Image (cartoon, rainbow, N blue to C red):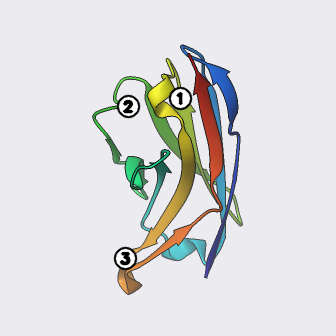
């Protein structure tokens, strides 16, 4: 089992920045990839960015050049961060942290954190 706790959402004006954090605990050694997804009002959940255990990153086209995903490890947690710059109103969504364990094909999800960008 993997537990995910997110923090860092909030309200920001267009052009501003926010940094989301996610701490994964539990069976962290099984995690192959961590990432961030988002679900805007009336929309399906979509991938924002991912980072593998080897550090390879992938971004949605809509956030390339504006968002940066990173990760670090402590003894008991794997942490992932999403630095969001030049935010736009269309970035408004609930952002979810994700951890994927490939060997058992399981995705774990955080509780979600609201990001609201005002125009």
Which badge, 2 or 1, comes first in the chain's sequence?
2
Q: Residue furthest left?
A: 61
Q: Nearer the viewer, mark 3 or mark 2?
A: 2
Instruction: Classify residue 115 by image quadrant.
Output: top right
Neighbourhood count class around disc 1 (C-alpha, 10 Å): few under 14, some 14–19, many 20 upward: many
Q: Does the residue at mark 2 contact the one at mark 1 (Cβ under 8 Å)?
A: yes
Residue on which the image places disc 2: 63
Neighbourhood count class around disc 3 (C-alpha, 10 Å): few under 14, some 14–19, many 20 upward: few
The residue that appears at 51% across and 61% down in the rendered structure is: 98
Q: Secondary structure at mark 2?
A: loop
Q: Quadrant of the image for the N terminus?
A: bottom right
From the viewer's perspective, tell me whether residue 65 is left or right of residue 3. left
The residue that appears at 68% across and 39% down in the rendered structure is: 9
Residue on which the image places disc 1: 84
82 relative to 86, above or below: below
Task: Measure the alpha-carbon separation of dots 2 and 1.
Answer: 9 Å
Q: Nearer the viewer, residue 2 or 13?
A: 13
The residue that appears at 43% across and 59% down in the rendered structure is: 53
Q: Residue furthest front?
A: 42
Q: Nearer the viewer, mark 1 or mark 3?
A: 1
71 relative to 66, above or below: below
Residue 101 at x, y percent in the picture: 44, 75
Residue on which the image places disc 3: 102
């Amino acid at each position: 089992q993997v537990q995910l706790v997110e923090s860092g959402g909030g309200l920001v004006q267009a052009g501003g920045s926010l940094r989301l954090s996610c701490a994964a605990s539990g069976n962290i050694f099984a995690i192959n990839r961590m990432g961030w997804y988002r679900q805007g009002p009336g929309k399906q959940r979509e991938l924002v960015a991912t980072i593998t255990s080897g550090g390879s990153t992938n971004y949605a086209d809509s956030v390339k050049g504006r968002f940066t995903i990173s990760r670090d490890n402590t003894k008991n947690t794997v942490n992932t961060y999403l630095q969001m710059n030049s935010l736009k109103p269309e970035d408004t969504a609930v952002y979810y942290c994700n951890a994927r364990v490939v060997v058992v094909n399981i995705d774990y999800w955080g509780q979600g954190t609201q990001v609201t960008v005002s125009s």
